Image (cartoon, grey):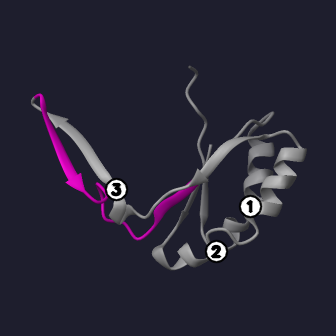
Amino acid sequence: MLLICGDESTAEHAMDGCDGWAEEMRRRNVLRGGGGLRPPADATTVRVRDDEVLLTDGPFAETREQIGGYCLIECADLDEAIEIAARHPAAGYGTIEIRPLLPS
C-alpha cells in the first residue's frame, strides 16, 4: 500500500497529475484501488479503554504531516513498489510511505 502524505499546504496539489499516473498503473495492471481522504479535522478517532468507547473529533495525534490518500498496488517486489511510488506525482511535493499488507 502506498500512503500518500504531506502537510496541509499540499492539499491544493492533491490531484495534480494523478489521473495520468493512475492510467499508467492500470495499463501495467498493478493498481488495485485507492482514494483520497478528507482532512484530519474531519476525522473521528475511536479508542476503547476499560471497555468504554472513547470518541474524539479530529485526529488522534497532532502532526505536521498527514495521510491524504492511499493507493493499493500489487507488485512483484519492493524494487517495483519503489519505482511505482517514485513515479507518483505526490512524491514531488510530499512523502509516499510504502507499507506491505499483512496476509489475510
Which residue corresponds to the image point at 81% horizontal and 33% vertical from the top-left?
76
Please name the amino acid that badge 3 sits on.
Ala
Which residue corresponds to the image point at 73% horizontal and 63% vertical from the top-left?
18
- What residue range appears in magenta? 51-71
Which residue corresponds to the image point at 80% horizontal and 59% vertical from the top-left?
21
Q: Earlier in the sequence, mark 1 or mark 2?
A: 1
Q: Which residue appears farthest toward the top when viewing the image?
A: 104
* Of 91 and 56, the residue lying toward us: 56
Q: Nearer the viewer, mark 1 or mark 3?
A: 3
Q: Position of residue 60 (x, y in %)?
A: 28, 54
Neighbours of disc 2 within 10 Å: few (<14), some (14-19), many (20+): some
- Per the image, label 1 sits on a secondary structure element best described as loop
Question: Which image quadrant is residue 88 in?
Answer: bottom right
Q: Nearer the viewer, mark 3 or mark 2?
A: 3
| Residue to which mark 3 is pinned | 43
Q: Measure how far apart labels 1 and 3 are at the Cα level.
A: 25 Å
Q: Are marks 3 and 2 in contact (CB under 8 Å)?
A: no
Q: Say whether residue 56 is visible.
A: yes
| Residue to which mark 1 is pinned | 88
Q: Earlier in the sequence, mark 3 or mark 2?
A: 3
- Per the image, label 3 sits on a secondary structure element best described as loop
Q: Tag on residue 93?
A: 2
Q: Position of residue 71 (x, y in %)?
A: 65, 48
